[in-house]
Each structure stands twice: as structure tokens, then as C-alpha cells.
Amino acid sequence: MPDRRQVLRTTLAAATVGLAGCPGGGGDSDGGGDGGTPTERTFTDPCDSVGDLAPSSDTDLLGIDDTNTEHFVHPDGSTDEVRFVRTGTTDNAAIAYAFGGELREASAQFHWHEAEGGDVRLEASTDGGDSWSAVDAAREEYGEVSASWHHATLSAEFPDGADRCRFVLTGGNKAWSGQLGHVEITYLDDGSTVEPGPTATATPQSTPVPTLTPIEGSAEDVVFEEFVETDGTEFVVDGEPAYYSGGNHPQVSRHDGGLSAKELLSTWTDLVPGLNVMRVPAFGEGQDNYLQPAPGLFSEEAFRLLDRVVYQFGRMGVRLVMPLSNYWDWRGGIPQYVEWVGASDKSAFYTSDEIRSYFRGFVETLLERENTVTGVKYRNDPTIMLWELGNEPRVGSADYETYKEWVKSTAEFIKGIDDNHLVSTGMEGFYGPDGPVGADPTRYVETHRIDAIDAATYHLYPNAWGLSKDESVEWIRDHATQAHEEIGKPVYCGEFGWEVDRSDDTPDSEELAERNAMYERWYEAMVDTRTNGAMVWDLRNESEYEWTSPWNRHAIYPRDEGTVALLENYTQQIRDLADES
């Protein structure tokens, strides 16, 4: 599914480089400022506009990260859309405040994630910022811990003579692991010329990048011993038919401070006890926190996070379907490979020898990697159900024969290294000009007949593709029937979704009811056609609700009780098909 990240609001960049400060604010007391008796004032900085802004949370600048706004919560339950935060760096960063008089006390709200480290430290200066010393600050947590995110109010009294203060966000595992908002500072206004407000600059303090917190685990924790294989039109495990039902989560293996695999799975295996498969990306190109930041360069920390994902899924009895590339430009994908070689079109991914070398080098690195938690190489890990060549790879501007040869040769390359796992395409299931959707000639039937491809797969997005409700049901029936009768292989629906716009004027209950009605029809069609696997797009955690709802219209949250009930019911029905084989 193409990424639909929110477009960040346009803001002005500060002239200074390094640390950006929150401007403005205002006092809430009258009087003073004329050289007479100092007057106590309180400066309030909502941190709603920071200079030197980062356009996203994946850059090397300091400033606002408003791609994760759901996480910064105030004591009254409200959320901030912007606040001071490190983006793209795990160095310490500070925001300093100077006023026209002695500082008395301060408070602020701070937010952090326990798995990512990062903290806040309050410091004061009595010599105009030449030297700093730590100030004891009380911390009172509030609200519930959501997705391991903690919220606290900080408060402190300053020592006599303090004329400057600063909040230091200390380095954690992630660029935005510590976030600061709503600073209040009480000071004695002595009438000097210093304007209330934060200083323009402060120098970030470098700290070593920490490693991920070790977790206890071993191969003995993993419940799987046998690999998934095929027998005609069936998936089989140890010779017995096996059917799969679960979902997708596109960010769980991304090194960006996202949801942990353990937390995601514990939520959904509780809600849907029969859930036994998840589709999770095994790709990422072009960013420091991705698996392959640059051609032939691999991020050990990102790979260690993927190690944890594979371990946690195996420990909880959920198989993995893992695409190895992405046709779209989220998380790098084929566009990043194309950019690396200076090509102008995605078709180069199928023809360029240089790209082929980069991609296959990554694939071989992944397959041969020894999981740092379990000690098992990926190619030998039965938790992985199958590899997909990519996420929705299309022919695009290439010709079909070139695309077909890429599918064949890439699948054979994988099997030359890994003869344990199944391989599929990851395609959407288009037919070409004569099909009901678009004109992309990926040729569902012909491509999946390739010997090195073990199972057929397709996706379903009728809202985006212009399919009617009845046509969407037929899409399922046609693909399942063709896979079983014409191709002679198992088939799974790797992604499917019906849009719910939670930000429009239509009551969510009405849109959810419509979605549930369609899901029921689709699942019934899958059961009736003995579809071998179904993976809905996409299963989210409740803490992800606020920031994903404006753009991710297919997301399913635990609060969507009717949809969850359908998943539980039909997951069991799909799995029960194994007993009827």
C-alpha cells in the first residue's frame, strides 16, 4: 500500500544552526519593569513554533517532529501537535531561557518512551551561561502508560542568583525519544533590557549513540520447528494442511521508535486468538535508521530491531510474510534504488546491473544473517512463512517479458541461498488492459505459473481502484479459483481494506458498519473458495489511533469492536478449513 504520510505544515527556518528555541510566550502578572521593586512574572512557552525546523522526523535537523503528535499528551488529556524535540539525532540537545531578572521556579511537561531511552535534565546558570549546574527537579507522572510512552510534569526551584536555565534532552536510541512542551518559568522582573523568551542558540552536546536494550531470548522460545511448504493447492506443515489468517503492520520492523512487535502481537493475539500470520516489511533503503542506508551499507541497529521482530513473532506462534523490496517510495523502495544509480524510471530496477547488485547484496545479507536473539540464520528460521519479491511490484513502464524475467531470476536467486522458505511475488493481482483494474500487465496467472514462485498472491482496494462492492467480491473469487484451477498453487490475499474516513462529517459508526458488511462478504468468499491465507490491512495499536486516522483509512484499531469480532470469527473459519482437507 503506498504511504500516505501527512504533509507537514510549512514553517520558517531559524537563521541560526544547531539548536532552535521556542519563541514568544508572555507574562501573566502586571507591574514591574521600571527599575523599582522586582515583580514576579511567569513566562509561558507553549513550544508551538521552533526555528530550524525539520521537514520530517527522518532528517538531521533539530526542531519540531509533528509526525507523531498523538504521543505528546497533557495532564488534561489534550494533545499537542508541535513541541520542542530532537529530530534525526541522538545527541543531547538543549533549549535555554534568559530573562530580565533572577529565576525562581520552573515547570514543564515531558514525554518519553521507555524502550528508547532519552531523558530531560534541568540546568541553571548564575554567570550568564558561562557555566551550568544541574537543578533537582521533581517528576510526577500522569495518565496511563500507552505503548510504553510515559508523560510527566517536571517542577523545580532555582538556586539563588540563577539568571539562565535550560532544559537538556539527553540522547536516547531514537531521534525523538524525548519531547518537551509547555514550559513555565517564574522570575523576578528587575527591569533590565533582556526580553522574556528563550535564547536563540545553545550548543547540542554530543553523546555516544546507545545500543538497543538487550532482551532475554533464545531459539528455544520459538514455537515453530517445521517450515511451511506446499502440496498442490495447499500450504502444509509437516505434511498437514495449514491455513492462515492475520494482518499487516507496515511499521513494526522500522527503526523509528515505533510500536514493538511484542506489544503489537500481545494486543492482537488477545483480541484474535487464532491469528497466526502477519505481513511485515523486510526492506528499507536510504535513511540511517533503515536496513540499507546506502548501497551496500547496512545498519546493524536496524537489523537488530528486525531480529527482535522475528524472535517475538516466533515466540508467540505467528508466522511472517516478508516483502524484500517496495515498488512505492515509502521507506526507500525501488525509487531509492533508481535514485542511487541516477536512473529516471522505476523500470531500471528490472534492467540495471548496478541495481541488481545492490538489491541482491541486500537479500543475501538478510538471508545469511544470524539473528542476534536466537542465533538462527534467517534462511533457517521457520518463523518466516515466505518471502515476497516485493510489495506490489508492477511492470510500470517496463515491458512484461522483462518484468517476468526479473521475477523468475530473483526467485531463483533467493532459492539458491535459501531452500527452506517459500517465495511469492507480493503483487496486487492485476491482469492488464483487459482486466477490471487499471492497465498494468503484471499478468496474475502467467507470472504465478513461474516454477520458482510457490504461491499466488493478490491485494484488494476497491475504493482506490474503482471496483463496485459486487466486483470486489468477484475479485476474490476469481483470484482464488484461478490460483487453484489454472495455476495449481495455494493463494493468499496479502492486503485488503475498505476505507473509513474518521475525520469527515459522516459518523464513524456508519462507515464502520459499511466496512464490516464488506469484510463479512469478503471473508465469506475466502472461506467458500478455500483461500489459503488472508491478511487484512492493517492491524494497529490503540496508541497509534490519533496520528494515523487522518490518512490511514484502512487501519483497524482495537476500539473497532465490530471489525475485531469479524476477524476473530472468520480467522477461526479460515483455520478450520485445514480440518476439511
Image (cartoon, grey):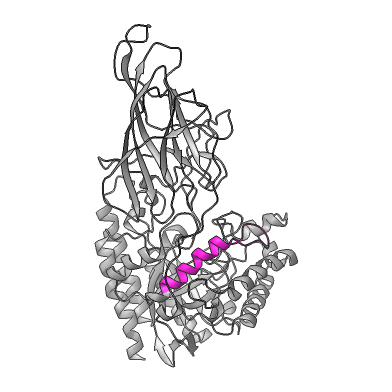
Residue ID at (62%, 66%) = 395
- Image coordinates of residue 259 in percent, x first then y, are 40, 59
Is the C terminus in the top left, top right, bottom left or bottom right quadrant?
Answer: bottom left
Q: Place residue 318 in its image quadrant.
A: bottom left
Report x, y in % for residue 468: 39, 63
Q: Vertical placement of 516 versus 42: above or below?
A: below
Residue 296 is inside the magenta segment: yes
Q: Is residue 212 visible?
A: yes
Q: Main secondary structure of the magenta part?
A: helix
Query: Is residue 421 one of those drawn in magenta?
Result: no
Taking the spot 25% from the left edge, 64% from the top edge, the residue there is: 562
Q: Residue furthest bottom?
A: 239
Q: Residue furthest right?
A: 353
- The x and y percentages for residue 12 are 53, 30
Labels in figure, total: 0
Image coords of residue 448 (percent x, y): 56, 79
Residue depicted at x 63% and y 68%: 362
Q: Is residue 518 above or below residue 167?
A: below
The quarter holding residue 297 reads bottom right
Query: Is 333 positioned to the left or the right of 162 in the image?
Result: right
**Which range of residues does the magenta coloring cover?**
292-313
In this rendered view, identify the residue nearer to me: 308 or 543.
308
Question: Would you say residue 445 is visible in this rendering?
Answer: no
Establish if 566 lies above or below 489: above
Vertical order, 480 against 537 (above or below): below
